[in-house]
Amino acid sequence: MTTSLDDIVETFDFLDDWEDRYKYLIDLGKELPGLADDEKNESNKVRGCVSQVWLVTEVDRSGEAPVLTYRGDSDALIVQGLVAVALAVFSGKTAQDVLATDVDAIFNQLGLQEHLTPQRSNGLKSMIGRIRADAEAALRSEDA
């Protein structure tokens, strides 16, 4: 994923209408490398999404705090774009930073909350819940 959160925010600010923003979300999703077929399994599947969404979490424990890298995929174009936004927000952060991130403020800044269907909004919440749960698990296993 080469698009940073700052780039996404800047582009959303530049685009005037939501049709263009949806097209941009789709483009972001198309840029994601996707997952291998064997990674699209039940353990990586995000529950609570109407569309198929899979997240793979990799934990790097080489530093002082675990750093999480996320990769994801979806079978729906706009949802794939939402996966790309979530990865831009969370991937490459420490578990503590993942948990401390005010994702609602970020999504409100982008206007996502008010422009997504209830199903997509619930799916996005499920995705974020999974990302946070993986961060909590990384912290728990660090303490063990």
Image (tube, grey):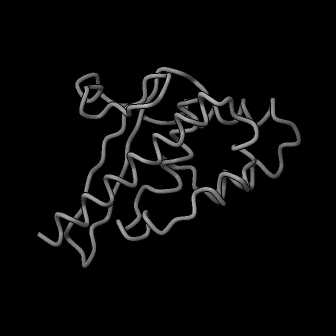
**Closest to the observer: 31 or 110?**
110
**Side of 129 relative to 139 (left or right):** right
Q: Is residue 46 above or below residue 111?
A: above
Tally the numbered discs.
0
Question: Is 90 in front, or is 47?
Answer: 47
Residue 68 in the image, given as x and y percentages of width and height:
33, 58
Q: Vertical placement of 137 versus 113: above or below?
A: below
Is 13 rendered above or below residue 37? below
Where residue 6 appears, x then y in whole percent? 65, 60
The residue positioned 26% from the left and 30% from the top of the image is 39
At a point 20% along the width and 67% down the height, the residue shown is 61
Q: At which x and y percent is residue 94? A: 36, 68
Where's the C terminus, which quadrant?
bottom left
With 36 as the anchor, is 13 left or right in this view?
A: right
Residue found at the far left of this picture: 144
Residue at x 43%, y 48% (from the top left corner): 129
Q: Horizontal placement of 63 versus 132: left or right?
A: left
Would you identify the image quadrant in which residue 102 lies? bottom right
Side of 60 where 25 appears, left or right: right
- Residue with the most extreme bottom position: 64
Residue ID at (83%, 43%): 15
